Structure formats: C-alpha cells, structure tokens
Amino acid sequence: MVVNCEHVWQEVSNYLEGELDPSLRLAMEAHFKECRHCTAVLDGTRNVIQLYGDDRLFEVPAGFGQRLQRRLAQQLGPAGFRRAGGFWMLAVAATALAVGGLALGNSGVFRQPEMRSPLARLPHGIPPASSLRFQMRGGSSTFQAASTCTSTRVKTRS
Amino acid sequence: MGSLPQRTNIQVKTEDAAEMREQDLLRRVQAGEKQLFYELVKPYERRVYTAAFSVLRNQAEAEDAAQEAVVKAFTHIQQFRAEARFSTWLIQITVNEALMRRRKAHSEIMEPIGERLQGDGNYTPRDFADWREIPSEVLERKEIRQRLASAVAALTEKYREVFVLRDVQQLSIEETAEVLGISRASVKTRLLRARLMLRDMLAPGLGAAWFERLPFEKGNKPW
C-alpha cells in the first residue's frame, strides 16, 4: 500500500490514536521516512496532544474548590453542614475574627487621631476646668461639657 | 515515530486504587452519606471547570455553570448507574449545563470568525514548520500557557468541545461522543481538524525559533 500526503493528513489523528489497520500504519510510517512535511505535521500534532493533556495548562480560579464546597454544604442543609465540618469552619472563622478584631483595636486604627495643630490641643496652658467657662451679658444657662465633665454656668442674653 | 506514550504499570495501579476508592464513595453517597459527595467530585474539580470553560469561555460564567452542574449531580446521584464512569457522567452534566447557559445568553453571536471560513471538506495543513521537541518546562511559562489557551479558545465550538473533552479531559472517543450526543465518526473528524488547526496556529511560534527568540524579548542576552 502506498499513501500520499493528503491521505496521511486525514489519518494522522487516527495514527496517533493507534486506530489504524496494520497495513495503513506501515504505509504511513514508510511515507514519514520520505516526507519532511508530513513528519512535521505528525510531530506538531503529537505535541499539541501532549501539551494540552498537561494539567498545568488550564488554571482553575483561586478558591474554586472552597466555593464549591460551600455551595454543596448549603445543599446538605444544617445537619449535612455540621457533618461536613461546618461547625469547625464557623469556629475557626469566629476565632480569626476575634483575634483580628483585637489586633486591629491595638493597632491604633480606631484610636482618636492626634490633632495636627499644637494650638488645638487641650492642655495648652489653660486648665480644663476653665476652658469652657465664659460669660455673656444678660441671662444665663447651664450645660454639661462632655470633654471635661464640668458643670458650667453660661450666661446668655434672655 | 508511533503513537502516543502508553501508561506505566505504576500509573495503572494508582488509577485502579483511585477507582476502587471512588466506587466505595459512590456506594456510601448513594446509601445516604451525602456529606461525602464533595470527596467524590474533588478529583474532578479541574475537569468540571475546564469543561464549562471550554463551552462558555468566560471564567465567572464557567465557575457558575460548574457549581450548578455539581449541585445537579448531587441532587440526582441516585440516578447514576455504574454503566458509565462517574467522571463522564459528571462532565456530561457540566457540558449540558454550559450549553444551556450559552443558548440562553445567545452567545453564538460572538462566534469566532473562523466558524464561517471552515468548510466541511478535508482540512489541509497550512504550515509545515518543524516542531519536534517540547521542552518539559515549557508549560511553566505563563506566556506559553496563555498562548495555548488563546489558540484553543479561537477554535469554533464544535471543534473546541471535542478537542477539550478528548485531549484536555482525556475522555475516550466513545465517551466524548456520548457526552456531546454525536457519532464516533463525527468525533474523530472534528478531533482531526481541531488538532491540525491548533498545530497550524502553534507550530510556527512554538517551534525552536520562538523559544530561542523569547529571551531576547525579555531582555536576557544569551551571550
């Protein structure tokens, strides 16, 4: 049996699958020895199959497995969720949240920022007790100054 | 010369052990231990995602479809019969889910230009660039992975689906035919064309010349 290039191209995939009868297979092998173009087609096709068969080629999005597991846990319902380790996941999440919260609290993120201007700082030579005390002519009223907890009488025009 | 590499004895033994474990898990899940279902699908996560991605070509949509397919498999696990492999059944559900979503989204409007150019006649290779060796570390390089992914994404649906199921998912020709609901002969024809088209797209670049050129592009002088 003798095969030409076109015949080889139409059978190259079956050749690589090992799905040819022995006579055609032998004829193709004889052709490959003679034909540089068909050998290039064979080598390239084999490379395509090997490259795409490699697990590293297609990346699954990060966290895909966890999200799938959560989705299945929802299907299982509360009992299945417990058996699937849901309580453990919750416990770990709660601990992480608590530890994270403490760390955040200590980090100063929620601390009152220091005022930029030194003039704006309270103890600038003025005693706190007198800092809110002022008097106006006519009438008076009293209010509680939250910052110093000082009861201050303020006179206002009535 | 010759066909693709055969599996070694160690590979065969490992696969047998995995299959036995899968059979055991299947029995237990079908008997009511549904919390074990994730263990059953875990080895196929990547394949399920890739199957959905091959149809939808969008990461977020593929993940949604893959999740939905796994949930459907979970819901209908009692209907699974041992005549087929569990992985084939799972991939079939995934492909169906993805195809249904694609139909809903009318994404055929966005088909690659090649769809209209590829006739039904025999495919003739356009390029005869020599591409003998693949360095084993080639897939470590992101730009090459991207190039390969782009090439397969550029195939039209009917070729891409067959190629992904057979050559990426490693389903047999019979399983691929079953999943797509087409004949064995159609699978073989589409597979041949897909492989040759990919070779035409990749060989001129992925041959030795392209690998040698890359270091220059990255600014690493070989001297």
Image (cartoon, grey):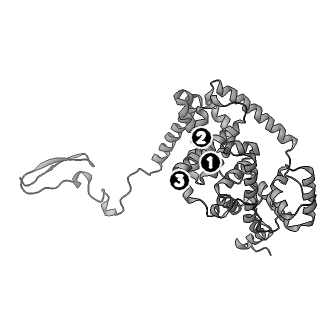
Residue B215 falls in which quadrant of the image? bottom right
Give the secondary structure at mark 3: loop
Given residues B208 and B69, the one toward you in this image is B69
> Label 3 lies in what chain?
B
Q: Which residue is mark 2?
A: B69
In the image, taking residue B116 as reference, residue B134 lies left or right, namely right
Give the secondary structure at mark 2: helix
> Which of label 1 and label 3 is nearer to you?
3
Question: Can residue A68 be seen at all in this image of the molecule?
Answer: yes
Three-letter amino acid code of the residue under disc 1: Ala
Given residues B14 and B223, the one toward you in this image is B14
Q: Which residue is mark 3?
A: B106
In the image, taking residue B7 as reference, residue A146 lies left or right, namely left
Q: Position of residue B66 (x, y in %)?
A: 60, 44
Number of marks in the image?
A: 3
Quarter of the figure with the N terminus of chain A: bottom right
**Disc 2 + disc 1, Cβ < 8 Å:** yes
CA neighbours of label 1 inside 10 A, class few (<14), some (14 to 19), many (20+): many
